[in-house]
Every structure is written in C-alpha cells, then in structure tokens.
Image (cartoon, grey):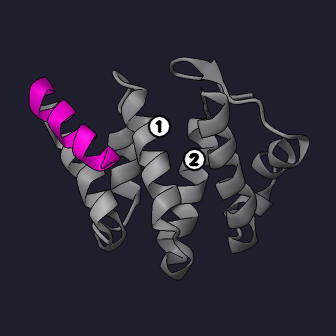
C-alpha cells in the first residue's frame, strides 16, 4: 500500500485495493467505488492520497460525473494533510470550473488560501462559516 503522509493510512477494501492496482482506476466506472472510499476515509479518520488523486483525475476527464460534495471532502482531506503539498497537487489536476462550481468548493478554496498565507484567525472564521 502507498505510504500515508500523515495520520492513519486508509484501510482499503479488497475491491478498492484491486481497483488501485489495475488499469480500471482510470475508467469512469471506478468513480462510484472511489467516492465511497472517500466517504469511508472521512468516517474512519484515514487518508488515501493515491485513491483520492485517482478520483480527481476521473473528475477531470468526466466533469459531468463530479459530485461537488465529494470533491470538497477530497480537498479538505488534502488540506488536513499539511505540510504535504497534496492539496496543491489536486488543485492542478482539478479543472477550475469544477473547483469553483459550488459555494462549498469556493469556501474550501478560500480556506486553503488562508492557510497558505498563515492567516489562521481568518481561516478559522471561514471554516466556521462553512459549518453553518
């Protein structure tokens, strides 16, 4: 399994592990399984950058299949993996039209920019707005 940057490595189900070891990870048919894996990471408090990156790549090539709420979870998980540059890597992959497609994704981007600028008080103000 790929090494986790921070925190606990996501325990992949056998089906997700097989998916990530095959060319199937590059097919739009993998989106549903990878989205479920993101939700499992949130529930379990784990992080799987490789699987999340594969999902964002699929969103890049099938933007009509993008679920903004799942993309937000992926970007938030990457933001929480600081000091890695995971969120930057994902932002380069994610088309701008998707990254700014909803108010939630806009708030996630704003929080990321505030963290990047070490504007911690403003970050927490914005993060609390996102909870509202």
Tell me the crowding category of disc 1: few under 14, some 14 to 19, or many 20 or more residues within 10 angstroms, Cα based.
many
Residue 7 pos. (x, y %):
55, 17
Q: Looking at the image, can residue 87 be seen?
A: yes
Q: Which stretch did the figure color magenta?
A: 120-132
For residue 52, which numbered disc appears in the image?
A: 2
Q: Measuring 35% from the left and 67% from the top, which residue is drawn there?
A: 95
128 or 121, which lies in front? 128
Q: Measuring 72% from the left and 64% from the top, which residue is drawn there?
A: 32
Q: In this image, 16 relative to 34: left or right? A: right
Residue 65: quarter of image: bottom right
Q: Looking at the image, can residue 118 be seen?
A: no
Pointers 1 and 2 in contact (C-beta within 8 Å): yes
120 or 33, which lies in front? 120
Q: Residue furthest right?
A: 14
Q: How many labels sit on residues? A: 2
Residue placed under numbered mark 1 in the picture: 77
């Amino acid at each position: 399994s790929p090494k986790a940057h921070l925190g606990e490595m996501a325990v992949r189900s056998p089906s997700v592990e097989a998916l990530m070891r095959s060319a199937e990870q590059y097919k739009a048919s993998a989106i549903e399984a990878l989205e479920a894996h993101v939700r499992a990471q949130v529930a379990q408090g784990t992080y799987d950058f490789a699987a999340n990156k594969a999902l964002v790549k699929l969103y890049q090539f099938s933007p009509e299949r993008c679920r903004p709420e799942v993309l937000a979870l992926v970007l938030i998980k990457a933001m929480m993996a600081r000091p890695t540059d995971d969120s930057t890597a994902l932002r380069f992959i994610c088309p701008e039209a998707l990254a700014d497609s909803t108010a939630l994704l806009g708030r996630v981007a704003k929080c990321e920019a505030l963290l990047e600028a070490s504007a911690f008080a403003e970050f927490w103000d914005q993060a609390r707005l996102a909870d509202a």
